[in-house]
Image (tube, grey):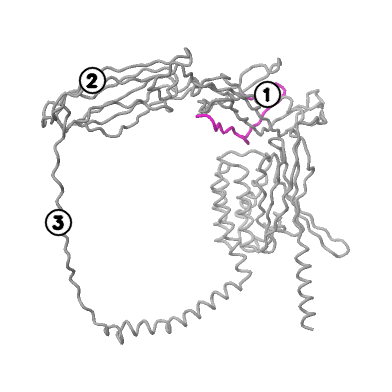
Amino acid sequence: MKLKFLLIVFFAGFSAWSQVKFDAVVSKETLGVNERLRVDFEMNEDGDNFRPPSFQGFVVVGGPNQSISKQWINGKSSFSKTFSYFLQPKGTGKLQIGAAEIEINNTVYKTLPIEINVTGAVELAKDPNDPASSAAENVHLVAEVSKSNPYLNEAITVVYKLYVSRETAVNGWNEIDAPKFADFWSQSLDEKQFKVYDGTFNGKPYRYVILRRTLLYPQKTGELDIESLALNINVEAPTNRRDIFGMRITRPAQITVSAPKRKIKVRELPEAGKPDNFTGAVGKFDFSVTASKTKLDAQDALDLTLTAKGNGNLKLFKLPKPTLPSALEVYEPENLQDVNVSLSGMTGKNEERYTIVPQRKGAYPIPPIRFSYFDPVTERYNTVSSDEIVITVENGPDALTSANGVNKSPVKAAVQFNYIKSEADLVAQDKDSFFMSKLFWGLLATPLVLIPFAIFFGRKREAYQNDIKGNRLRKADKLARKYLGEAKKNLGDQKAFYLALEKSLHNFLKARLNIQTSDMSKERISRLLQERGANVSTTADFIKLLESCEFARYTPASIDAMQQDYNNAGSVISEIDKQL
């Protein structure tokens, strides 16, 4: 009989567990690189802390959109909740949509990964009334490279321009894929203010803005890729419909544009005529060596400065090392760079400053120092040589010379060591001093004293763990503060910020009102808050924050608006805590 009862309980529990469903469904498993994909994460029970996959290889162009459905059929209820995303592939090949996660009844469920086959571009049926289709033909992003076959370490620039037809209006954009420039030294020259220029694209009149200018110095030879830049753009595109006044009707749309990859072929620096002292300087430079003083006493210090000035890869080469007499004590050099970066390359100076301290009296010549660089304009190596500098040490000990005339330094006396004490002053201890002492009885009684405290705290811990409702509320409150912290970290990233802020507000409601996400309608939240003691104005502020999170999915928000919403969230949550 007991075995039968256990089997019934086991199968009932298994049946209840198997009723939870959490699946990923895609609109198609094969699509062209210019098509979009919809993926739905569906569950039949309400859950918390939904975590989507990273969507590696895709650009998220829409979502997350959330929908909830409840039905009663023949006395049975059914529930459905869906998170939807719209994805644009970044390239061709086999891509994978990873596993999403959701927490349902304190259990984490995961979807199975889905493999997507992305082919080359396919011909799409064009709807003349579709604003996205119209905008895609009237918005273009291009990358212009100043030179396609530079030398190694020669400066080139890449300029990204956004061309827009005169019939299309752009309401803003955000960067979704930026070039890494892995094989280049690079520095972006940000545009302080976007200026609109008139130009042509494919022979037609367009307007364009310069989004970014980047200075590059190739660090490898051979064929290198300049990766594409991709943007998500909000546009107002014209349709074929007209209003009653005959004006073309425009509709908002969101499109993705990218500048195609550009390839350059980087040439090796020529071996013919390369000087032995060449250290990689490419450009056009002047070179000088100066001493802060040429007459001084022994143990005084002077600075020897090597300076290369001009236009070229100033941050990417080393200056030659001077050859100095052994009687001059030389410290490690200090590298000083004063470099400006512009579209013409790096300009300024690169210098190294050596601190030198002569030890003995005499005259010490510093031989000429040679500096070589490659000029990509003339395609030739040039060598500049400094003048000889003589350092005269007027006062100090005389230099010692051996029979062959080589300077010698005096031998210093050996360091003397004190004798080490070899006898220790040890004191005998009484072996019986611990037994029956106060320390002995104290250690013996400690476990007996601690047992009641252990029993008391054990019962408290057991009661804390058995408080399921309280633990759920504490967990929700902890999650609310965690997501509010995540929102602060993501200030400036609109999507991540408002997603974290919304999760924080929902978990706060769970902790204070003991309601689930599916029951969080604005009317019910407002009614429950006021029933628990929150005043009307505070409740209205909370509802306004929830609306801001919803509007942020469809409309762009500035960094100031995000900062204001974050400050409002902290003050409203604190105020509701006091009032409840």
Residue 172 falls within the magenta-colored stretch:
yes
Image quadrant assignment for residue 75: bottom right
Residue lying at the far front in this picture: please name it.
403
Instruction: Pinpoint residue 291: horizontal percent, then vertical percent.
Output: 24, 23
The three-letter amino acid code for the residue at tag 2 is Ile
Mark 1 and mark 2 lie on one chain; the one further toward the N terminus is: 1
Task: Name the residue beneath numbered marker 3.
Answer: 418
Q: Between marks 1 and 2, how big is the CA–CA gap?
A: 62 Å
Label 1: state its secondary structure.
strand
Q: Say which of 396 and 524 sits in front.
A: 396
Q: Which of the numbered marks, if any, corresponds to residue 164?
A: 1
Give the SS element for disc 2: strand
Q: CA distance from mark 3 to mark 1?
A: 86 Å
Front-most of residues 555 and 76? 76
Do callouts 3 and 1 mark residues in contact (Cβ within 8 Å)? no
- Camera-near label (2 vs 3) is 3
Please check the rendered image and state whether residue 413 is part of the magenta-colored stretch, yes or no: no
Q: Residue furthest right?
A: 74
Q: Amino acid at mark 1?
A: Val
In the rendered image of this protein, does residue 151 appear above or below residue 103? above
Name the one closer to the observer, 163 or 522: 163
Camera-side mark, 1 or 2: 2
Q: Which residues are magenta?
A: 161-185
State left or right for residue 558 relative to residue 55. left
Q: Which mark is on residue 389?
A: 2
Picture quarter with the N terminus: bottom right
Quadrant housing residue 22: bottom right
Q: Check disc 3: other Cα within 10 Å, few if <14, some if 14-19, many if 20+.
A: few
Kindly report the secondary structure that dominates the magenta region of the rendered protein. Answer: strand
Please tell me which residue lies in front, 57 or 541. Answer: 57
Residue type at numbered disc 3: Asn
Q: Residue at x 48, y 16 (%)?
A: 376
